[in-house]
Image: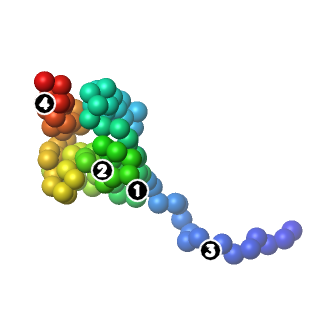
Amino acid sequence: MTALPPSSFPPGPAPAQVAFNRRELSFILSVYGRMVAAGEWRDYGISCLRDTAVFSIFRRSAEQPIYRVEKAPRLRDRQGMYSVVGMDGRILKRGHDLKTVLRVLERKLIRAVT
């Protein structure tokens, strides 16, 4: 029997990633779809990092995101794990319920349509 070569990876389980589940993505994509239909947004990106999941919203593909919807489970017991962050880095809304947090973006939809 041959010995396995030593691994360059540290022992133990791989670090877990934070990601949006199907229900959360459904809420986010619902708002995103309405804003795309209104002609306000054109692209998005999803990042699943070790401690945060980020849904970035772009007006054009080559720009910085105009909004970021973030999920940070480590903040679950404090301010709430969901937040909407503006282009300038300010937190526009934070809370425990994603639907409630996304309402800050729906207000932008009402202004865009009228």
Q: Locate the C terminus by quadrant.
A: top left
Instruction: Determine whether 20 is above or below 10 in the image.
Output: above
- Cα–Cα span, label 1 and label 3: 22 Å
Residue bearing mark 1: 49
Question: Quarter of the image holding residue 34?
Answer: top left
Residue bearing mark 2: 65
Instruction: Determine whether 14 is above or below 84 in the image.
Output: below
Residue 83 rendering spot, x and y as whole percentages: 21, 47
Q: Residue at x 76, y 70 (%)?
A: 4
Residue 106 rendering spot, x and y as whole percentages: 18, 31
Marked residue nearer the N-terminal end (4 or 1): 1
Instruction: Determine whether 53 is above or below 111 in the image.
Output: below
Residue bearing mark 3: 8
Circle 1 crowding by C-alpha within 10 Å: few under 14, some 14–19, many from 20: some
Residue type at the position of mark 4: Arg
- Cα–Cα span, label 2 and label 4: 19 Å
Circle 2 crowding by C-alpha within 10 Å: few under 14, some 14–19, many from 20: many
Marked residue nearer the N-terminal end (2 or 3): 3
Marked residue nearer the N-terminal end (4 or 3): 3
Q: Nearer the viewer, residue 110 or 31?
A: 110
Q: Locate the N terminus by quadrant.
A: bottom right
Q: Residue at x 36, y 35 (%)?
A: 25
Residue type at the position of mark 3: Ser
Residue bearing mark 4: 111
Please state if 69 lies on the left or on the right of 78 as rendered: right
- Camera-side mark, 2 or 3: 2
- Name the element at disc 3: loop
Instruction: Determine whether 11 is above or below 102 in the image.
Output: below
Q: Is residue 80 visible?
A: no
Residue type at the position of mark 2: Pro
Residue 55 rendering spot, x and y as whole percentages: 34, 45
Labels 2 & 3 near each other (Cβ < 8 A):
no
